[in-house]
Image (spheres, rainbow, N blue to C red):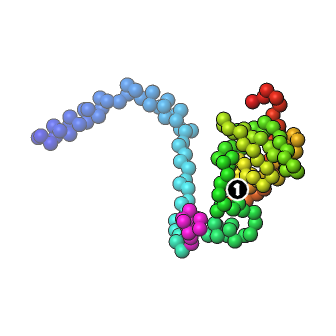
Amino acid sequence: MRRALAIALGLFLAACGGGEYQDLKEELKKLTADLRGKVDPLPVVKPYEPVPYRALDLPDPFGPAKIELVTKITSSAGGLKPDLNRPREPLESFPLESVKVVGMLQQGKQTYALVRADASVYRVRVGNFMGQNFGLITGITDAQVQLRELVQDASGEWAERVSTLQLQEAGGR
């Protein structure tokens, strides 16, 4: 008897629920009939191919051995290079931009330039060094002092550069 009652109750509930939203369900079904979701296929994944590291036996480009090798090549190249063992002259401690030619002096056949650096005046001649780039005085005229400087480029090579210091006008500092 319980069984029959449970079946009857189930049929009763099934018969009760239904027609209230049936038109809405049909309209929704009609509107969504054309809509189909499309999912793109997954991309093909390439298999991983490991690359072996073969630079372990190569020299470290930043290590001291590489720097020493570059120094040896540069020094054995036989090109321009300053004499680092010679004694420094007083005017080599000043940048060339801070040195001013304030006068010329001639004694016999020798011409000298009077140069002011800082608060002192120095007498220089051809063959003296001046400036922080190994500047060798190559010529002195009535209006200027000519120098040959040795500067080092990024690759470590020494290059020659010609500079001139003009005589300062009277009253100019």
Residue 59 sits inside the magenta stretch: yes
Indicate the position of residue 95 as horizontal and vertical percent values. Answer: 68, 43
Quadrant showing the C terminus: top right
In the image, is 9 to the left or to the right of 83?
left
User: In the rendered image of this protein, does residue 74 appear above or below residue 149?
Assistant: below
Indicate the position of residue 161 as horizontal and vertical percent values. Answer: 79, 52
- The 10 Å Cα crowd at callout 1, few under 14, some 14 to 19, many 20 or more, is some
Q: Which residue is mark 1?
A: 152
- Is residue 47 in view from this perspective? no
- Quadrant position of residue 72: bottom right
Residue lying at the far top in this picture: please name it.
Answer: 20
Residue lying at the far left in this picture: please name it.
Answer: 1
- Quadrant position of residue 64: bottom right
User: In the rendered image of this protein, does residue 20 appear above or below residue 3?
Assistant: above
Indicate the position of residue 131 as horizontal and vertical percent values. Answer: 71, 47
Q: Nearer the viewer, residue 46 or 56?
A: 56
Residue 18 sits inside the magenta stretch: no
Q: How many marks?
A: 1
Quadrant showing the N terminus: top left
- Is residue 109 in view from this perspective? yes
Q: Which residue is depicted at the point 83% across and 42% down?
A: 105
**Which element carries disc 1, helix, strand or loop?**
strand
Residue type (three-letter) at the residue carrying disc 1 = Gln
Indicate the position of residue 26 as horizontal and vertical percent values. Answer: 47, 31
Q: Which residue is depicted at the point 55% across and 56% down?
A: 43
In the image, is 122 to the left or to the right of 3?
right
Q: Nearer the viewer, residue 55 or 12?
A: 55
- Quadrant position of residue 102: top right
Q: Which residue is depicted at the point 63% across and 66% down?
A: 71
Q: Which residue is depicted at the point 69% across and 71% down?
A: 76
Residue lying at the far bottom in this picture: please name it.
Answer: 57
The magenta stretch is 58-68
